[in-house]
Image: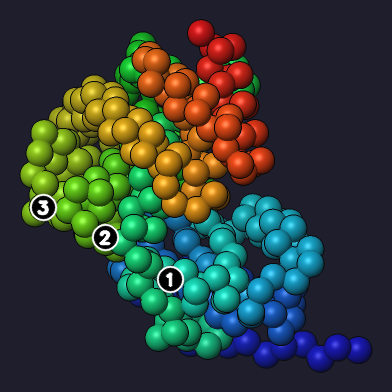
Amino acid sequence: MTEMEEVSLVGLTENMGVNALLFGFVGLYALTFPGRVRACYLVGSHATCEAVGESDLDLTLVFKDTFLPGEEDRFERFRMAVGPLARYPLDLNAVEEARLVAEGEVNLKQNALLIAGEDLRDRVPLMPLEAWTRHSMHQPYRFIERARARPEDEPLRFPLAYPDARGELYGYDYREVTDAQGNLHRGFKELVTLACRMATAVVALDAGRHTFSKRDAIQAHREHLNDTWTPLYESIFALRQKWGYRVPEDAAAKAALKDACARMLDAENAFLARYRDFLLLEVTRGTVRDRVLAARRLGDIAYPDAEVPQALERLLDSPEPSLREAARESLARLAKAA
């Protein structure tokens, strides 16, 4: 009989309810992956004492060395099983120790709380700015895309329309938020996250700076860019600070939120215009993996110009099979959507 691994909490938050959840979580992962987890970190707003009532608990497990065969699939099953058991919404991630040490990190290195295991952040470099910029520029698309229902495999059409032009908040309240009692509420968490992700991306691209939290991204946008979108991002973050992620009942606050939602569409389209130019450069540089992602993303957004399909057609002559395949698939998606 295998002896159960003894893992104890080494870091605590200011919230006793969160600490109780962390204690149970540490026991579960130690039982599920005995001897395999180097460290468990809490990242995000709970780690920086900036959480609001409906903030996720962002937890990262660092697996020793590299993943064993089948371990990523086991973690995914673990993630799906544990989430519904928690009083707080969980965002669970797993990463290989070897990849962290080789490629670096940003949030985990600068703004994380070690919950259990061995702290390895001294061995983890800050992610190089080029890699961080690439990572940050791709992030907003995920939030822009999932707000807009459409047939499977149909690309977004640029310029975007509102997620729901007839909705009170134009569809930006499409995802409910969960409180600590498990109750669902109308929420605008996705709006806040999208604003902060876009701020993070352009601060990296235009100012050449890493940012380490939502607050840091908004402040850096003011300090280094201070452009048309800075007041919008600040107003969205201020609403989050005062009301959490629930749509407020207060009439003045709801009016301010509605105004921010009305202006968000122009901000999204401005970002996607920048993203197009970024992707057209990306398909010509970087690793094959980077170029493949850019080629696929150019098929995810139907831009109304000839330059995108021309760039994809040039990739059909690439010596890399994966790049040729990505270009073919993107061209097919765009042709179908035309």
The residue closer to the viewer here, 16 or 155, is: 155
Q: According to the image, label 2 marks what residue?
A: 211
Q: Amino acid at mark 1?
A: Gly
The residue shown at (52%, 24%) is: 313
* Local crowd size for mark 2, using a 10 Å CA cut-off: few (<14), some (14–19), many (≥20): many
* Local crowd size for mark 1, using a 10 Å CA cut-off: few (<14), some (14–19), many (≥20): some
Question: How far apart are the alpha carbons under marks 1 and 3?
Answer: 24 Å
Question: How far apart are the alpha carbons under marks 1 and 2?
Answer: 14 Å
Q: Is residue 145 left or right of residue 52?
A: right
Q: According to the image, label 1 marks what residue?
A: 104
Question: How far apart are the alpha carbons under marks 2 and 3?
Answer: 12 Å
* Circle 1/circle 3 CB separation < 8 Å: no
Where residue 321 appears, x then y in whole percent?
Answer: 66, 40
Mark 1 or 3 closer to N-term? 1
Q: Amino acid at mark 2?
A: Thr
Q: Residue furthest right?
A: 1
The residue shown at (61%, 42%) is: 319
Where residue 154 sits, quadrant-wise, is: top right
Q: Is residue 96 above or below residue 78?
A: below
Position of the N terminus by quadrant:
bottom right
Where residue 310 appears, x then y in whole percent?
Answer: 45, 21
The residue shown at (17%, 53%) is: 207
Q: According to the image, label 3 marks what residue?
A: 224
Mark 2 or 3 closer to N-term? 2
Query: Does dot 3 land on a helix, a strand or a loop?
Result: helix
Mark 1 or 2 closer to N-term? 1
Q: Amino acid at mark 3?
A: His
Query: Does dot 2 land on a helix, a strand or a loop?
Result: loop
